[in-house]
Amino acid sequence: MESMEDDSLDTKDDHNHNCCASSSSKVRTYLRNQLSGVATVPQPACPLVPGIEPGTRRRKLWSGSTGGSKFMDSDSGSESSEVSETDCTAPPAAVEGKFSLESTSKFLLNAMAVEDYRKNHWPNLEKAIDRLLIQNPTDHISVSYAQIYSYVYKCVCQQHSELLYNDLIMKLTNHLQQVSTHLQASPPEDFIENFNVALTQYTASLQCIVPVFMYLNKFYIESKLNRDLREDLMKLFADYVAEIHVNTLMPLLIKAHSMPFQVQPSTMASVVKGLYSLRPDWAKLAPALFSGFIPQINPPAVESLLPDYAAHDQKLQLDLSMNGFPRGDQSRKRASEDS
């Protein structure tokens, strides 16, 4: 009887063509709910729209002139939000199709942005990096730093930070591999000088490359990778150049250090300090060599070893005098005021 009674609920349209139940059906529904003790909640005429929370005030749909549907507050008559008809009447498959269409459009936009990066941004940056890498410290190369900075800024803003960082690392890695190949072909008598040129030139290039990639360093390398761009790029030189040739370079440095002025002192200091900045552990390979250019390499002095320190200084003075560096004419030394 109840099912037949449910089916017999009559409905009618109001003057706005909205479907609503008759007053008699409402009364029967109310009485049946009271008798059964179960409270039912009336289902909305339109499914809830994602992102719109149901309010405390009753709302109803009304048809607008544009063909869409708008929610109106029944007590105030103010417009709340606008929803298209398809959002209310479309089946779940149609909604899923809408989301898939949006996902496809986002994918296409991302693909277009990557293509623009590959065709425009990175080629211009690569050309500028090439010019900065091959320059000598004394040469002046006309490079628009403002333009490079602008390209880097756009790449970071367009969410290409990871792509730009990987391309930069790969570019400098390939360059350093070529530098290592050239060093391998250097003769022993020129190896120290050529290594110093490679290290000096690369360090000077980083003084220009790191500042123009400031946005990449700040918003990606430091914030997400917890590293620093300059440290990463210097580590590349240590991995692909210095570590490969350190076993060849160290005996040459020790030999040159034992024969004063065989290599320019400035070159010796630059190479030894450069090696120590790249890998401080390399100082253990030749403590006597590194202690001549890096302070506090050796352990602190011990009072019991003072005679050994004096003997070492005397031996050094003797070696210098035997190699053509006399102490000078002591007779021309100014007499003291007491004499």
Image (spheres, rainbow, N blue to C red):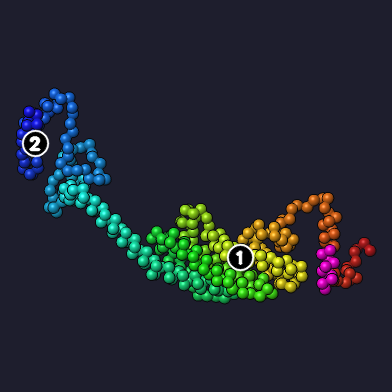
Q: Which mark is residue 21?
A: 2
Identify the residue position indicated by label 1 in the image.
244
**Which residue is rendered at x = 59% and y = 66% of the image?**
241
Q: How many neighbours does mark 2 have within 10 angstroms: few (below 14), some (14-19), or many (20 or more)?
A: some
Q: Nearer the viewer, residue 159 or 4?
A: 4
Dominant secondary structure of the residues highlighted in magenta in the image: helix
Give the image quarter of residue 278. Answer: bottom right
User: Residue 59 placed where, x, y %?
Assistant: 17, 40
User: Residue 136 placed where, x, y %?
Assistant: 58, 74
Residue 154 higher or lower than 20, as above or below: below
Residue 11 higher or lower than 235, as above or below: above
- Please give the count of numbered marks on the rendered protein: 2
How far separated are the C-alphas under marks 1 and 2? 87 Å
Give the image quarter of residue 188. Answer: bottom right
**Residue 230: in magenta span:** no
Residue 77 visible? The answer is: no
Q: Which residues are magenta?
A: 315-325
**Which residue is rendered at x = 15% and y = 44% of the image?**
61
